Image (cartoon, grey):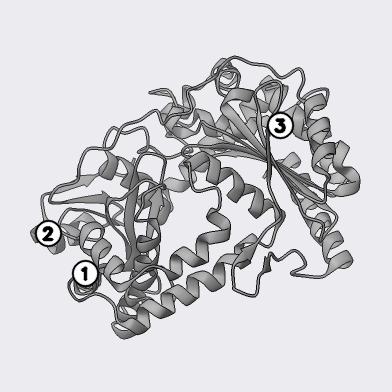
Amino acid sequence: MSFSRGFVKTGAALLAAALLAATGPGAIAPARAATGTLRLPPVRKITLKNGLTVFVMPTHRVPLVDFRLVVRAGSVNDPAGKEGLASLTADLLTQGAGKRTARQLAEAIAFVGGTLDANAGVEQLTVTCSVLTKDYASGLELFRDVIVSPSFAAEEFARMKAEKLGQIASDRDDPSELANNELGPFLLGESPLAHPVIGRQASVGAITRADVMAFQKHYVTPANSMLAVVGDVDPDQVVASLESAFAAWKGGAGAAAAPVYGAPEAVTGRKVLIVSKPEVTQTQIRLATLGVPRNSPDYYAITVANTILGGGFTSRLVNEIRVVQGLTYGIGSRWSMYRNAGTFVIVTFTRNETLRKCIDASLAVVQKLVDQGPSEEELAKARRYLTGQYPLGLQASDALAAQILNIEFYGLDPRYLETYAERINAVTMADVRRVLKQRFGVNDLRILVVSDPKTAQPALESLGPGTVLATP
């Protein structure tokens, strides 16, 4: 852990302590109307003179304000041969900006008990800042600087690049991380979605400081970004302060807002990939196929169906594979949804000698649910769980900021937050049965394991054509 990142963590602790002392836990939970509908403060949407789209939501339960900027660029925008560029660029944004060095920047945010961070995902580069309301001006200044004028000092570039390469090397020794990183290309082929966000050893090694500066200049522009400010603020004052703070941030048109990739090649039949790790005693397992984009009309039905299958601790996969058969300590199913594609993956692990049994049992659970559908009790329980948990995820202002920007990013219904529970409760048994048959099939599948090939190959040979990959 770097010196500056340690200060950021300290700032987070100070902020949490201050809020807890002043207000107590759970103080900013969204309100519910008598009908059960989620009630949130109104969101004001404006466009600054420089073209930046801004959303402001005032909440006055605690003296806190959260800034969140989302840039429409992530690892899908990494140039070929320099995968990991978006991630490295994001990490460097907070390592010196404006007139401050990395140490001075970290000390400045720690002094006000706040947090300042930047990171890149598959399709988004995100910059966040949280401060107490009384420190709004200081927080905005630091937040603005890392967005508009990062210094990308040569010594910080060299340090962060070395840290990335060290993390990549460490991930190769972690069977779970290894499985996740190799699943992308196995499932998605040559799609820009396939490579790990952090990149590969060779690709990160090829990145130069000039590459980082060019990525930031091209993608981090007002036209290619959107900003949410949520907290104890006055919307008019926020807009005025943002106009002033970002007046000099012009930039070009930047990258197109549309996804830069097409739909991945269809998955047909079953194929097996064994990632060689002879020393492991437990095998990591990934059972994967293609999914749907985030704005799919089947989103709510899929969410309910997946909760029943493997999205919760009382799901069918957990009950059968962990509790009844004792084949694993943990198993679950997850959907990752992007702007133009998606994936569905069952994640688990088991002892080497029970590898085939675990896979067969997991597929049998899925097939039974697809064939027979859930019980009425399972459907009702899933809906209760989802609608009960959802408001808890909106208690903090930073979570609200993230949700507001995701609505814009994915082109969702502007009333998504308020109508989520209503739409989950509207999912019928017929809806769940339909998406199970259409989206949860196990005939077209990619089966990846991290294991000893000597024992894994004989166990898996009848599941489909197989390949052994040496540990990268």
User: What is the crowding at mark 2: few (fewer than 14 residues within 10 Å), some, or many (at least 20)?
Assistant: some
User: What is the crowding at mark 3: few (fewer than 14 residues within 10 Å), some, or many (at least 20)?
Assistant: many
Which residue corresponds to mark 2?
A: 463
- Looking at the rendered image, the disc whose residue lies closer to the viewer, 2 or 1, is 1
Residue 414 lies, in percent from the top left, at 55, 48
Assess whether mark 1 and mark 2 are in contact (beta carbons under 8 angstroms): no
Element at label 3: loop
Give, as a three-letter code, the residue at label 1: Val
Which residue corresponds to mark 1?
A: 370
Q: What residue is shown at x 40% (from left), y 48% (from top)?
A: 337
Mark found first going from the N terminus, 1 or 3: 3
User: Where does the C terminus fall, quadrant-wise?
Assistant: top left
- Looking at the rendered image, the disc whose residue lies closer to the viewer, 1 or 3, is 1
Q: Nearer the viewer, residue 350 or 393?
A: 393
Q: Which mark is residue 95?
A: 3
Give, as a three-letter code, the residue at label 3: Gln
User: Where does the N terminus fall, quadrant-wise?
Assistant: top right
